[in-house]
Every structure is written in C-alpha cells, then in structure tokens.
Amino acid sequence: MIPLELQPHSVASRPLATVKSPTKLAMALGSLLLLAMMPATWLPSVSIGLGLVYMVIVVLNRISVLFLLKRIVCVIPFVLCILFFHYKSMGLQGSFHFLIRSTFSVATLVLFTATTPFPQILSSLKAFRVPHLFVLVLALAYRYMALVQSELSNMHRSVTLRTSHLGHFERWRLYGRMMGSLFLKAFDRSERVHHAMLCRGFHGDLN
C-alpha cells in the first residue's frame, strides 16, 4: 500500500512556506479560473507559462517530480472516462484541450496542498467565507484518513496472504467486496465517533 503522504513539502524553510496561505489559495483559485474560462486560442501560451511557473515552484521547494506525477496520473483515468462519453461533442481538438486543462488543474491543487499545512488550508477557507460545515467535513476527513488507510492496508494484506492461489479475476472480485466492507466499517466508525463527540459537548466547532 502507498503510505499516506499528502503534505511532505510544507516545510517552513522553503520559499512557498513564507507566503500567507490565503494568498496561495487566491493564486490557486485564480489559476483554476483561468484554466477553466480562457479561450482555446490562449491554451498553448498559458500552458507554457504555467508549466514554467510550476517548474520553478518544484525546483525552489524541492518537490519530488515523482510525487507530482503520481498524483496527476491518479486523476487521468477519470478524465479519460469523461472524454470517452463526450468525445463526439468535443472532437479530437476539444478533447486534447480538456486533457491539458484537467492536468494543469490537478497540478495546481497538488502543489497548493503539498506546500501548505492542512490547518492553514482550513483557515484560508474560513477567510474566504467557505461554509463552516464544508470546512468541518474536510477537517474530520483529514484527521481520519490515516485511520481508514491503516484499516485498508490490513485488509489488503489479509486478502493477499489468503488468496495467493486465486487468479486475477477472482482476486479483483474480492477487492470489490473488500471496498464494500471498508465502507461499512468507516460508516459504523463515523457513527460511533459522532455519538462520542456529542457526549463530550461537541457543538460543531473543532477549535
């Protein structure tokens, strides 16, 4: 299993760490809006410009290129799935433009989250008047993500040790059942955690 490592580059001594998190969030949102709304004729020049800026950020903050590429590649299958269903309406050129916009959008989010400590991301969202419930859900999801990954790792190890004699198809069927079981366990744990928080006086604020 891949270890949970969302923010390995948010070190205080690196250049982007000195920039205030609301400023970084505003820059990231501006980049996303530019990528989403700019005309197709701007795409080549904007892509080159953003590519150079992101290369500078990666070098100055000593971010692993493999770290960035692994997270971009994780989203590519979803982008290709969208293109599969909308290829006729987009055409070849439109599909290529959509792929470029999506890739740079994911890179923007990865660089922002990798160079900004998560508590600062939450405070930036609050500064931008993001609904409190959304920020609260993000905070809880982040806190329990490592716990869910540990549970998934244990289940994966158990399945691997006990099904070494099975073929790939049967093993993938077991993985599907494993994900369903993980969802039920996570849901049950969330209910128990919620009741425990209410018993301790929780009123919607983690501070």
Image (spheres, rainbow, N blue to C red):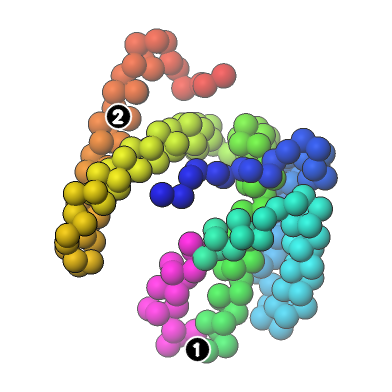
Position of 177 with respect to 20 (left or right) is: left
Q: Is residue 135 above or below residue 9?
A: above
Secondary structure beneath dot 1 equals helix
Compute the Cα span from label 2 to label 1: 46 Å
Sequence-wise first label, 2 or 1 = 1
Q: In which quarter of the image is residue 103?
A: bottom right
**Location of the C terminus (image quadrant):** top right
Residue 198: % across, % down: 36, 15
What residue does disc 1 label?
91
Answer whether residue 126 is visible to the viewer in this image. no
Give the residue type that dot 2 points to.
Arg
Compare residues 31 and 147 and report the one nearer the observer: 147
Compare residues 11 and 29 and report the one nearer the observer: 11
- Which of the two discs, 2 and 1, sits closer to the camera? 2
Residue 164: % across, % down: 21, 57
What residue does disc 2 label?
189
Residue at horizontal 49 percent and vertical 63 percent from the top = 75
Residue 129 has which mark?
A: none
Residue at horizontal 54 percent and vertical 58 percent from the top = 71
**Number of numbered discs overlaid on the protein picture:** 2
Span shown in magenta? 74-91
Position of 169 with respect to 140 (left or right) is: left
